[in-house]
Image (tube, rainbow, N blue to C red):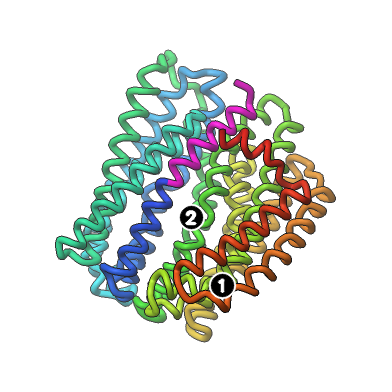
Amino acid sequence: MNRADHIVDGFKATLLARGIYMVSSALLMFVLARYLLDPGGYGALYWAIGVLTIIQLFADLGLSKSVARYISEYRETDPGQVPYLIRSVITAKIVLLTVVGYVLLLFHERIAIALGDPGAAPFLAAGVLYLVVFSLSTFSQVAFQGFNHLGYSALVQAVSGTGRFLFAVAFVLAGLGALGAFFGYIVGYAISATLGIGILYYGFLRKHERADEYEEGLSRRLIEYSIPLTATRSANVIDKQIDIVLVGFFLNPAAVAFYTLAKQISDFVLAPAESLGFTISPNFGEQKAADQLEEARRIYETSLTNVLLLYIPAAVGLAIVAGPFLTLVFGSDYAAAVPVLQVLAGFVVLQAITNLTSDSLDYLGRARARAVAKGGTAVANLGLNVLLIPTVGVVGAAIATVATHSVYVAVNLYIVHTELELNVVRIARTTGLVCGITGVMAVAVLLVTPLISSLFMLVGAIAVGTITWGVLAVMSGLVDPRQVRSVIG
């Protein structure tokens, strides 16, 4: 199988499983927000998860991504080192999880009070379990990426999403409220972690004959490379979660619900770009090691073009139909989330490019440069959130996210360009053509939007935009129907 076919197959597997994950996540979001929890309970749940995601940084650091990078390299050159690499990371994770879990259990009440929500203490106490199972589940996914066996990684993620949905809904229906939904998250991640670690051990580690000794200096390089990855991941998590935490701190749980729902919808739209970035990134490390940068450039430019073709129109369409979409699907209680979703439509395009680019930079060995960029924009995002949320409200958090992420995307693209020497003129020409198609599509959707009074009419408006986009994309030559059929088939 050639590299292009391998990427396509990996993309299909990843997209299918992430589709299952995102559909289950969307169903959970819909059922909880529409039927089972009020905005206050919904906001309390995801505010607690946001806080725990930040605490998770101290339990994970950047070791998972670092070991994935070295697995990708050594599975070809010296596979006997792979068991040593994984053993080192698992040992470190056990130590970190033990320390962080103990501190959280000891101080969970004080942390909740300090953050302005004493009622969140039970979530933080149960969060010790959440940290362990989430860490192991995500570690197995990233390790499979290093082995370039993306089907297993996708399977683990799909199982986690399905398990979360089933158990969260079941526990809420049993009368446990938002805390029950949180325990549903824990059970879902526990199942996927068990599956992932089991496959990793029986399917990979037992098949790798261990070398006589750990390569001298390899553990040191593993830790050294994890440092910029830790900085990048910390900045990335803070960038994504600190706004949720600050909305809860400055405003109230209902405002958290409005902001979180808008971000979850944008995450759902981003699933294809995340799948593509996750799929192609290990190939960059292999191609750089083999000095095949021309092939790496071709793959990246093609992927970037496709991402822009899909996400610029999608973001514009989302901004146009945000009002009827939120009120018809989730109810009038969430009308206050409409301007937030409209602002975050811009973030959809930016994050789509980031999803394609960030992991690729890690495999190209440019994690340090990306860490500096991410750290700077994360600090700027924090400052803007503190400034805008008290003055503008929940929309201020969305504005801060879009403003700072624009800078980060620009820096990422520049770093990729220095590595691969991208054809900037061709990319700019294609982007201009995509914007022209988007303009025509937007006019078509705006004409029918005033007619939307039911879910049926909402689907019809989306269909009008999709058909208009599809016809123009084919006529312009940006989409070849034969290639689409070959990929789907």
x, y percent for residue 450? 57, 78
- Please name the residue that numbered disc 2 is placed on: 234
The magenta segment: 1-19
Q: Quadrant of residue 482?
A: top right
Is residue 236 shown left or right of residue 244?
right
> Which image quarter holds the C terminus?
top right
Query: Residue shown at 20%/56% (left/top)?
Result: 170
Can residue 231 be seen at all in this image of the molecule?
no
Question: Could you tell me which secondary element the residue under label 2 belongs to?
Answer: helix
Q: Is residue 13 magenta-colored?
A: yes
Question: Could you tell me which secondary element the residue under label 1 belongs to?
Answer: helix
The residue carrying pointer 2 sits among few (fewer than 14), some (14 to 19) or many (20 or more) residues within 10 Å by Cα, namely many
Q: Quadrant of residue 17?
A: top left
The kind of residue tagged 1 is Gln
Query: Residue shown at 18%/62% (left/top)?
Result: 173
Q: Nearer the viewer, mark 2 or mark 1?
A: 1
Q: Earlier in the sequence, mark 2 or mark 1?
A: 2
x, y percent for residue 118? 25, 74
Label at residue 230: none
Q: Quadrant of residue 402?
A: bottom right
> Which image quarter holds the N terminus?
top right
